[in-house]
Image (cartoon, rainbow, N blue to C red):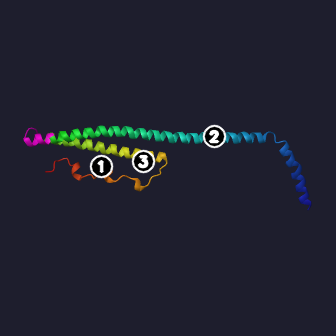
Amino acid sequence: MFTMARRYWALGPTGAALTLFDGGAKNTQYKQAIDSFDASVAGYRQTVLTGFQEVEDNLAALRILDEESQVQDRTLAAADQALALTINQYQAGIVSYLNVMVAQTAVLLNRQTAVQLQGERLSASVLLVKALGGGWNVAMLPSPEQVGGEVKWTDYLIFPVD
């Protein structure tokens, strides 16, 4: 009982003195809370702006890669046509087989570039979906026919198949 009374008198007046004379501690805590809130808002704002930047960057990348793919498709079509002409010239005996091999190499290099561009477009698409927060499932993926059909192994041969 004696220790209980001593605790009461020790905490009572001291506690009142601390709340009356805090020396500006409450004001400092208030300012710290405001500063913490401002820092949280700034962090949130930066996160949102980074998200918008990622979306915009990937949309621009998709547009640029689409244009590059269209140019590459035209280049590949021209290389295929040049290969067909060179094969006809070789069969007619006008040019050597070395010309056919050079034309086949050009076609192969153009196909490799087209595949690389397609891979970059797919990567940019994945990064765009990631920047947008996902929200898709496997059922929404395109079918092989929508992507461009199956790839035949004969498409990548350097030497003509008769």
Q: Is residue 22 left or right of residue 118?
A: right
- Decide if residue 30 is in sight here: yes
Which label is found at residue 126? 3
Q: Which residues are magenta?
A: 85-96
**As displayed, is residue 40 above or below residue 136?**
above
In the rendered structure, which amino acid carries the disc numbered 1?
Gly
Would you call the spot at circle 3 few (<14 residues within 10 Å), some (14-19), or many (20 or more)? some
Q: Where does the image place residue 74, in percent across and percent down from the top left?
A: 26, 38
The quadrant holding residue 82 is top left
The foreground one among 21 and 89 is: 89
Numbered disc in front, either 1 or 2: 1
Numbered disc in front, either 2 or 3: 3
Q: Earlier in the sequence, mark 1 or mark 3?
A: 3
Q: Where does the image place residue 42, in percent across and percent down from the top left?
A: 60, 39
- Decide if residue 96 is in sight here: no
Type of secondary structure dominating the magenta stretch: helix
Q: Is residue 83 left or right of residue 142?
A: left
Q: Which residue is mark 1?
A: 148
